[in-house]
Amino acid sequence: MKRKIALSWIIVSISVVTCGLAIVSCEGKLDRPAGPPEKVTLAYTTNPNSALVQVALKKGYFAAEGIDIVAQPHLYGKAAVAALVEGKADLATAAETPFIFAVMKGSKIFAVATIQTATKDTAIVVRKDRGINNPQDLKGHKVGVTFGTSGEFFLSSFLTVNAIEQKNITIVDLQPEQTVDALLKGEVDAVSAWNPNVILAQKKLGNNGAIFYGETAFTETFCLTGNQDFVRKNPGAIKKVLKALVRAEKFVKQDPAAAQTIVAEIIGMDVALLADIWPVFNYSVELEQSLLVTLDDVTRWAMRTKLVKEKKMPNYLDFIYMDGLAEVKPEALRIIR
Amino acid sequence: MNIKRKLYANMIISTIIMLVIALVLYGSYHQLQDANRKQAIATELLRNIYERVSLRDEYLLYREERAKIQWQRKNAERINILSQADEIFQSPADKNMLLEIRENQKISEQIFSEIVENHRLATSGERAATLARHIEDRLVSQILLQSYNLLTNAFRLQETSFLSLAAAQKRAIWIVFVFMLVMFGMTAGNSLSIDRIIAKRIGKLQEGTRIIGEGNLDYRIAHEGTDELTELTLSFNDATEKLKRHRVQLEAANQELDSFAYAVAHDLRAPLRAMSGFSQALLEDYGGELKDDARVYLDHIIMASKRMGDLVEGLLILSRSTRGELKYSVIDLSAQASQILNDLAMGDTARKVEWRVQPGLTALGDIRMIEVVLRNLLENAWKFTSHTVAPLIRLFAEPKGEEHFFCIADNGVGFDMRHAEHLFKPFQRLHRQDEFPGTGIGLATVQRILHRHNGTIHAIAAPGKGATFYFSLPLQG
């Protein structure tokens, strides 16, 4: 009888251990941040392009991953990259255009991941009362744009695919915060800008305004960039930052309304207006082969238009840090290697 | 819950769980089919993208009309593939991906058209060559970018089919695992419970039946629960109670019968003795005056009286064999048998009978009773070898299986084994009175005495080849 009881206990014990092993093997190891939080200064833009960063900040994902984040808001990517280059930030969010300008000027920076893409974010907003009803009508008019940004590259591409020579229009350099006012006041006839300025300008112009998109001319690619020295010395911190952004990506996909509320609050925009343009943005932490195409494309344009002195195309593989994403979200690393 | 219900529950649980597992596997099979269809569509889409990329590059290199037409056909084919994909990919994430693919497709188509148009304008001289080149550079960059995005989305679509398959398999494995665990737990619990019943309670029942079987009719088997074993125990206890009552009644009836037989035998002796005595006196005192026929009649009366006397004596011995308390002691069977054989030899000096007694045979028993046993068996052996030329009587011990027997064997007339069942019944004889005189009570007495000692007796014989009587008794020590 005792032997039978012992046998029963052995069977039950084996079952429990088997269950435990099965659960552990299926659930995988729990990954918890160890050690004190790592301090990272992140320069980010206060527009919807940096929505993942804004959500991660608001939801405390950086802290949860063990990052003591110092958030540094900037109006646009060019300013954020400038902070990065000047050593005021370790990481920055910016579109492809300020990134390539910094690279072409010799800055040692990395694109760590793309955090947003769009074909309808950057656009040209025109005043109809100035006789602009289609792209060809831009000839002879004054167009405002922020130099050194994706707005400038988009304008150039838009004009090119519409067979409009740049000498036929007048381009005016405006700071991003000036674009809407300049258009409303009639200081310019059109502006090449990105959201929220595009939608704000359109709303304020009402029936007098029109938007020209250029899906065949440009795809906006917004990236998380970093100082090469910092990235190489702090691979663990990069991993944690990426993990926080991936968590934000999941949140944005699962609860877009809540994400819109967070972003609208941070960038000071009406949430309903933001909801209207939200579908324009594709929020995904990734590194695609198309990023290289875009970087080469913008660089060719910058060299051809003599916006940069350098005449040799850099190998952008040397300016992309893939190890972080390879560990955090390997399925999103699709650069041909 | 009784045992039958427990076993029934085991069967029901196993059946339900097997049904659930079968349903899960059936569901998994359909999910697998679904994933395969998704795979096929995603592969078809990827093939279409690769073909269009090749045709696009061919067109960009050589500007052949044929490549352009083929590209456009492939584009139309892709619309059809995407329509099929819409029916199969149903999750919101998949739908989003398909939306992106359609968007990619739309932009790619537009860019390709613009490239074609740009080329037409350049070759017709309507657009300056430098401007046309710049436009094409722009457009080609964008179409390349779109192609990569398209490929990425198509690969993702393919991955989702892999993932949905893996998820279905994981889910199926978990469900099967959990249900099997539940089945194991419940059946093991039930089996352990049944095992406990069998090991503990049937053990009690077995022990009880052994004790009762040994004659302790006052013993009652303890019971618990409300299952079949409890019912069996209660029935058994009930049967034991009835058996006890019947035994008491039977013992009383037997005692009454024995007392009656003893009284009859005892009371018959005096009139019988008178009848025999007066017959003898009549013959002695008036024999000369009687006619020959009358004397013969008187002889018959005297002989019949003597035989009746023997029968009465036998009945008294048989009756005594079941009466009185047994006083156990160690008996030297060898010595007792030798003494009886010597007595027999002295009483029948005309015969020469050989005997062999195995020395040192002992057993536990009532010495008076066992003497009756040995005397009866040895007298029978002596009697039934009377016609044998070289009579031999033996006493020896013989183990047979797990039992230990004492044997008394002779080489006398033996008997036919077909009549062996009558051997130990009172007044049953296998030989004629004139051939071998006797009362037919001796072996019945022997059997009763041995049974009272918890012993047994049986015989093996053959006509003309003697007989061997095997009897068992408690052994010494």
Image (cartoon, coloured by chain):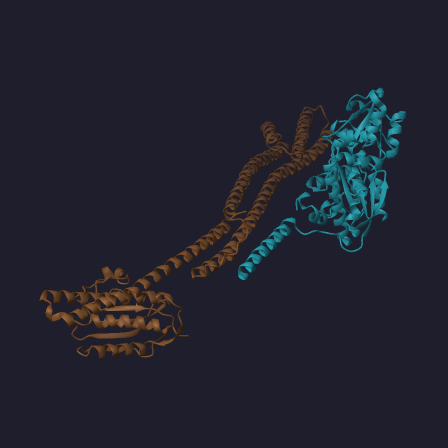
Chain colours: A cyan, B brown
Q: What residue lies at 77% left-to-right and 26% top-to-bottom? A: A212
- Give B207 or B129, whichever is nearer the viewer: B207
Residue B337 located left or right of residue A258: left
- Give B456 or B201, whichever is nearer the viewer: B456
Residue A335 lies, with reference to residue B98, above or below; the image says below
Q: Quadrant of residue B32?
A: top right
- Give B279 or A122, whichever is nearer the viewer: B279
**Does any portion of residue B426 appear in the rendered image?**
yes
**Does any portion of residue A113 appear in the rendered image?**
no
Percent of width and height locating residue B10 = 52, 46
Residue A83 located left or right of residue B38: right
Percent of width and height locating residue B221 = 50, 57
Residue B55 located left or right of residue A92: left
Residue A8 lies, with reference to residue A242, above or below; the image says below
Q: Quadrant of residue B72?
A: top right
Q: What residue lies at 24% left-to-right and 61% top-to-bottom? A: B428
- Give B336 or B81, whichever is nearer the viewer: B336
Q: Quadrant of residue A115?
A: top right
Percent of width and height locating residue B98 = 65, 32
Residue A79 lies, with reference to residue B375, above or below; the image says above
Residue A94 lies, with reference to residue A129, above or below; the image says below
Q: What residue lies at 46% left-to-right and 53% top-to-bottom? A: B236
Percent of width and height locating residue B380 = 24, 70
